[in-house]
Amino acid sequence: MAGKIILYTYFRSSCSWRVRIALALKGIEYESRPVNLIKDGGQQHAEEYKTLNPQEQVPTLVWDGIPITQSMAIMLFIDDIKPNPPLLPDDPVKKAQALALAELINSGIQPLQNLHVLQKVGEDKKTEWAHFWINKGLTAFEKMLKDTAGKYCVGDSITLADIFLVPQVYNAHRFNVDLTQFPLIQKISATLDNHEAFKAADALVQPDCPEDLRKK
Ligand SMILES: O=C(O)/C=C\C(=O)CC(=O)CC(=O)O
């Protein structure tokens, strides 16, 4: 695996967080470049950044000068350039289950509680809005886990489903979703919280995490 990797990231952006977990699981070194989504009206809208990421979002991974956007595409790329440990099971059914769980969050929850959507929904309604969509999505996720879970979301190996789950659980706490309704999600995310790669990728230990939120 050749190539210098730069990751444009924001500490609590779910999508950046996922990529940080994948890089940590693979043991891939990278240079982290923080993009503050709030400061200066959002540094993701800066002209220079827009040329890398026309959607004006994080993350962007730059590999040997080539920008790659979208967390799912980035993680599949990482899995291709460094196949071990794999992010998806070999078994076709398990692979589809892991992708279905990941997509449930990727397209069914996270985009609805993303910064730019909440800005459009408005300050007074945003908490109720985010709470509704996270609660609805995680209710389905928990039901699916009944058929797929072992130690992790799909069997006993870490997959993309686990990588997507952890940042979404952070957001569930942030928007006051009662996680005691979801015993499997709670159990698996507690196990993941103790995993070294997940600890290293945690939003609250990143260099751009503000001091008042930082994990002590
Ligand atoms: O610090 C902030 O308030 C701004 C941005 C975020 O939380 C990141 C998101 O938009 C949510 C997410 O990625 O899930």
Image (cartoon, grey):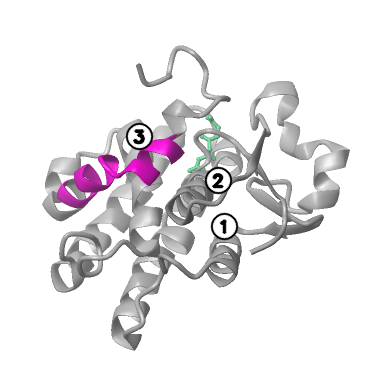
- Where on the picture, by quarter, is residue 204? top left
- Pick the front one: 104 or 48: 48
Is label 2 within 8 A of ligand 1 (CB to nearest ligand atom)? Answer: yes
As displayed, is residue 151 above or below residue 125? below
Write down the residue under mark 2.
16
- Residue drawn at (31%, 61%), measured in percent from left and top? 158
Label 3: which secondary element = loop
Is label 1 within 8 A of ligand 1 (CB to nearest ligand atom)? Answer: no
Label 2: which secondary element = helix
Question: Percent from the top left, x then y, of residue 132?
Answer: 34, 46
- Where on the picture, by quarter, is residue 86? bottom left
What mark, if any, has residue 71 been given in the picture? Answer: 1
**Nearer to us: label 1 or label 3:** 1
Q: Is residue 187 left or right of residue 4?
A: left
Labels 1 & 3 near each other (Cβ < 8 A)? no
Labels 2 & 1 near each other (Cβ < 8 A)? yes
Q: Earlier in the sequence, mark 2 or mark 3?
A: 2
What mark, if any, has residue 175 been given in the picture? Answer: 3
In magenta segment, residue 1: no
Q: Is residue 149 left or right of residue 39?
A: left
Label 1: which secondary element = helix
- Pick the front one: 162 or 116: 162
Query: What residue range appears in magenta?
Result: 187-202
As displayed, is residue 139 above or below residue 103? above
